[in-house]
Amino acid sequence: RLSGLYKGCAGSLVGQVPYGVLTFGSYEIYKQALLNKFPNTKPALIYALSAILGDVTGSGWLCPSEVMKQQLQAGLYPSMSEAIKGIWSKSGIAGFYQGFTGGLARDVPFRVAQLTTFEVTKSLYLKAKKGRTGDDNAALSA
């Protein structure tokens, strides 16, 4: 049935939006802390490690929402509140983290490639912009 495609949509939004905030927000915090703590380390390594840590942080929120969404879509529960109650009663907190490792195995390589590429490209762009304008503050205006 087509209606089954939309079951769990609210749960998905409740999962994806905070996941993005947690992942990218914590990435920036980890990146700044690591750049400050290890100033002589190649920035690309810092970006990669920060991306890993950021995705692990965000996944702590994402995994439970994915479990609920999948079980709603499979028709195991009629509502999100019933899914929460059912998962908790059957498996406790661990029930909300079914597939956590698999999710990390899927998401972390992408996040490392995405954020490291973004940071390196941004850095190259800002250096080129600074070189063209001769302006020492060009990086601040981007």
Image (cartoon, rainbow, N blue to C red):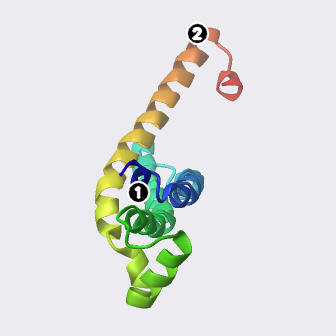
Q: Is residue 42 visible?
A: yes
- Name the amino acid, label 1: Ile
Pinpoint residue 15: horizontal percent, then vertical percent: 53, 60
Q: Residue at x 41, y 40 (%)?
A: 114
2 and 1 marks in contact (CB < 8 Å): no
Q: Is residue 8 above or below residue 140?
A: below
Identify the mark at residue 139; answer none if there is no mark. none
Q: Residue at x 41, y 57 (%)?
A: 52
Closest to the observer, 74 or 46:
74
Where disc 2 sits, the SS reads helix
Q: Is residue 30 visible?
A: no
Where disc 1 sits, the SS reads helix
Pinpoint residue 101: horizontal percent, then vertical percent: 31, 68
Q: Which residue is mark 2?
A: 132
- The numbered mark, 2 or 1, whose residue comes first in the sequence reads 1
Closest to the observer, 26 or 81:
81
Pinpoint residue 119: horizontal percent, then vertical percent: 48, 36
Closest to the observer, 42 or 112:
112
Q: Quadrant of the C terminus?
A: top right
Q: Which residue is mark 1?
A: 52
Position of residue 30 in the picture relative to residue 101 (left or right): right
Q: Is residue 130 above or below residue 44?
A: above
- Name the amino acid, label 2: Arg
Pinpoint residue 93: horizontal percent, then vertical percent: 45, 84
Closest to the observer, 129 or 99:
99
Q: Residue at x 44, y 90 (%)?
A: 89
Dot 1: within a 10 Å radius of its alpha carbon, few (fewer than 14), some, or many (20 or more) residues? Answer: many
